[in-house]
């Protein structure tokens, strides 16, 4: 009998297993074969992730090999750069995320956590005093508490347990090893967030620049995997505004990863003896598709909620676990998510206005230091519950003022609603 079983060993699940194994008997189960290789990724970890990562790991140069110094909110007309030199401290760190996950799992195992890789869960049975997990080999494990950290890959399990599932969209990701000299010559940023409705009206195209590697991709619409792959190939070969970045880089399209990305939080993330974390619960910011912060924060909240319940030998009832839902609301949904909700409503879904608004916003970043400062402060904030939504409204008012007169006439009802989020 385990105290806690965690299904899913991505950033969220591995982080939770590491923290919970300090005080509980934990089993971490992952469907991918991590014994062979954890898939390589480059991710951006803003400074606001730091409170949820132990210093020992945050300072690990294998997991976080370089600082994040420059953000580029890029449109077809402008580079809306947020450069740390203007404000004095790097925006955060760049992660080689497979190394980060590897460290979390290693430290969790050192604390007594059991791990099972290349193992898929076929059925979950709830009993009055425990939860039974059955894998695809017919083997079973029992636990006092089950934690689902399956991202968007375990929705069938969630539904079978009576949980809602979040909205999901198809995303495509490609990682490539690149000589450092080429990276230094091609990129004056470590992260680029770019909107173009001809690529997708639902999400960004991006570059993440690591150490000796770069990743790229975009959030698609309703294309098939083959269409996503073909479009990314055409973007990398022909999209004029990014050709200066990809010069000299060889992309192996066989390394493409295609899968669902979720967003929009489910209404209830706990039930008797079960908690849902991170992307599985839709905890991904609606506009920016930032899942790392939400995964780390939800893992931290869950660990803190569970520890006293376990020490008091409680039943892990829904009424006891609901504190997790309440803390998610307080720390993320009631403040931090509101900007993403407003931006999603304002920018996405309307091809005719998307370019105009995004061009106006990037021009404002280019010219207005206060707007750049507010973005910088969001990336640096250490207490998410103190997120200042008044700054977002201030930026929204000036963005509306920046629009051409005809756009103002058609867009003011949408801006007015967005400002109320």
Image (cartoon, helix red, strand yellow):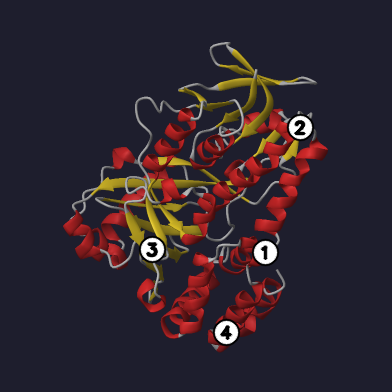
Identity of the residue drawn at 39% across and 46% down = 173
Q: Nearer the viewer, mark 1 or mark 3?
A: 1
Q: Which residue is mark 3?
A: 192
| Residue plotted at (47% across, 47% down) | 171
Residue 209 visible from this viewpoint: no
Residue 92 at least partly seen: yes
Q: Give me the C-alpha separation between circle 1 and circle 4.
A: 21 Å
What's the mark number on residue 398?
4
Element type at mark 4: helix
Quadrant containing the C terminus in the rendered view: bottom right
Q: Which mark is residue 335?
A: 1
Q: Which residue is mark 2?
A: 312
Q: Secondary structure at mark 1?
A: loop
N-term-proximal mark, 4 vs 2: 2
**Can you tell which quarter of the image residue 199 is in?**
bottom left
* Whether residue 66 is situated above or below residue 420 in the rendered picture: above
Q: Secondary structure at mark 3?
A: strand
């Amino acid at each position: 009998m385990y105290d806690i079983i965690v299904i899913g060993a991505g950033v969220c699940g591995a982080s939770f297993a590491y923290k919970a194994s300090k005080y509980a008997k934990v089993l971490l189960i992952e469907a991918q074969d991590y014994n062979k290789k954890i898939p390589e990724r480059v991710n951006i970890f803003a400074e606001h992730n730091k409170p949820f990562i132990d210093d020992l790991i945050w300072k690990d140069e294998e997991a976080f090999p370089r600082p994040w110094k420059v953000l580029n909110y890029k449109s077809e007309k402008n580079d809306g750069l947020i450069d740390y030199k203007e404000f004095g401290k790097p925006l955060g760190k760049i992660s080689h995320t497979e190394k980060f996950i590897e460290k979390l799992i290693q430290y969790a195992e050192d604390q007594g956590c059991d791990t099972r890789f290349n193992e898929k869960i076929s059925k979950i049975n709830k009993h009055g005093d425990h939860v039974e997990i059955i894998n695809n080999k017919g083997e079973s494990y029992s636990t006092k508490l089950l934690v689902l950290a399956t991202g968007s890959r375990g929705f069938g399990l969630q539904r079978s347990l009576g949980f809602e599932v979040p909205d999901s969209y198809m995303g495509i990701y490609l990682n490539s090893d690149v000589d450092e000299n080429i990276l230094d010559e091609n990129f004056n940023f470590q992260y680029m967030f770019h909107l173009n409705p001809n690529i997708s009206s639902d999400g960004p195209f991006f570059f993440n620049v690591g150490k000796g590697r770069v990743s790229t991709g975009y959030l698609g619409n309703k294309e098939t995997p083959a269409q996503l792959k073909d479009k990314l190939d055409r973007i990398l070969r022909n999209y004029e505004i990014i050709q200066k970045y990809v010069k000299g880089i060889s992309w192996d399209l066989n390394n493409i990863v295609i899968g669902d990305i979720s967003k929009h939080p489910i209404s209830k993330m706990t039930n008797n003896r079960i908690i849902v974390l991170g992307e599985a619960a839709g905890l991904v910011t609606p506009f920016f598709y930032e899942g790392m912060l939400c995964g780390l924060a939800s893992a931290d909240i869950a660990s803190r909620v569970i520890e006293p319940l376990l020490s008091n030998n409680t039943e892990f009832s829904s009424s006891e676990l609901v504190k997790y839902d309440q803390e998610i609301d307080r720390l993320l949904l009631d403040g931090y998510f509101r900007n993403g909700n407003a931006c999603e409503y304002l920018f996405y879904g309307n091809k005719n206005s998307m370019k105009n608004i995004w061009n106006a916003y990037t021009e404002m970043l280019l010219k207005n230091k206060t707007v750049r400062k507010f973005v910088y402060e969001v990336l640096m904030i250490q207490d998410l519950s103190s997120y200042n939504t008044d700054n977002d409204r201030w930026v929204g008012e000036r963005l509306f003022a920046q629009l051409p007169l005809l756009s103002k006439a058609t867009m003011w009802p949408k801006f007015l609603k967005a400002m109320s989020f």
